[in-house]
Image: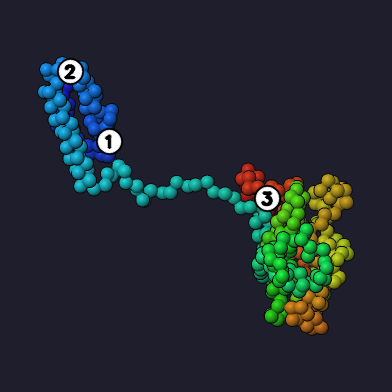
Amino acid sequence: MFEKVEEYKKLLQDAKASTRDELEQFRMKFISKKSVVSELFNDFRNVPNEQKKAFGQALNELKNQAQEKFQTLVDALDSAGPDMSEVVDMTLPNIPGETGSIHPLTITRNKIIEIFERMGFNVASGPEIEEDFYNFTALNFPENHPAREMQDTFFIEKGPDKVLRTHTSNVQARLMEGNTPPFRSIMPGRVYRNEAISARAHCFFHQVEGLYVDKNVGFKDLKDTVYHFVRELFGADTKVRFRPSYFPFTEPSAEIDISCFICGGKGCNVCKGTTWVEIGGCGMVDPNVLKSCGIDPEEYTGFAFGMGIERITMLKYQINDLRLFSENDVRFLKQFEGTF
Ligand code: DAH
């Protein structure tokens, strides 16, 4: 027993710690509850009675010596400055994190912007929380139009009404109000509708609106613009069909269909055998809309269109479920990198 005490005292004298790790090893060995010193204290009861006093004294000396030595080692390390083995080398290159990929809807939106910018359109945007006036009234929606009902529209406030915009057409009104033509803008953005979520419908999606107002703008300008856009986006062989329709803010109005580029006119499940697929609506800006925005319809005319960005993306990539766009599964999203 006494020999052990002597042996440890010797070890203590020679002990060194040049790093924090070594200091910790010292602490474990001589100071902690599991240290060799604690072990000897546990052995105390096995020491014959006549030796207890002397052994107790020796043990206490050993314990004090260990603590003093520990403090000396701590002080030495502290005054030596930082342990270079633990200092972060700020000049090392970064460990790269995993990067995401561009979202397929962003790819489509950027491509649409690129095509229209080449035709002289600029990009405008407006709020997603919108006053009734810009979302409905200025766009010639009658007071009792079904889109104003709670079941279609998310209301934020009632009287005066504020809604989550149901389409990007609100930006048309904001763009024109208080400004003078010409206007030649596209307006991409997110829109909201109170719909049950399924493969074909969602409570939010994206549209791109277009507006061209100037002197002597006619339906032929609308057709030219849409033709050019469709051929740039879907390929030079794509045919376009204008199908008569109705929107409160355009007169006349049409639905834009393109020839189904998936089956090439044979009929498939995307075009449901019709050989045509719809990509949006369009028309000549209704004179009432121009008037609501302070523009003289006798002097200026214009056309407008609105297309679904999800719709175009789904057609382009043959994606069959709208929910995939907002589920954030990188395995789905990564597939479209570098395409278009
Ligand atoms: N706002 C319409 C919708 O959400 C789309 C639309 C149709 C926009 C015709 C237009 C247009 O600018 O001229 O269904």
Between the C-alphas of marks 3 and 2, the distance is 77 Å
Labelled pair 3, 1 in contact (Cβ < 8 Å): no
Percent position of residue 245, x then y: 87, 64
The answer to whether mark 3 and mark 2 are in CB contact below 8 A is no
Residue type at tag 1: Glu
Residue drawn 80% across the image and 81% down it: 297
Q: The residue tagged with tag 1: helix, strand or loop?
A: helix
Looking at the rendered structure, the secondary structure element under dot 2 is loop
Using the image, determine if residue 242 lies above or below residue 11.
below
| Label drawn at residue 24 | 1
What residue appears at the point 61 percent right and 53 percent down from the top-left corner? 102
User: Which quadrant of the figure has residue 242?
Assistant: bottom right
Residue 78 visible: yes
> How far is disc 1 from disc 2 in space, using C-alphas?
31 Å
State which tag comes first along the sequence, 1 or 2: 1
Residue pictured at 74% horizontal, 81% vertical:
294
Classify 10 Å Cα crowding around label 2: few (below 14), some (14-19), many (20 and above): few
Q: Which residue is mark 3?
A: 325
Q: Residue 47: which disc?
A: 2
Identity, as a three-letter code, of the amino acid under mark 2: Val
Sooner in the amino-acid sequence: mark 3 or mark 2: 2
Which amino acid lies under the numbered mark 3 shown in the image of this protein? Phe
**Residue under the point 69% across and 74% down:** 175
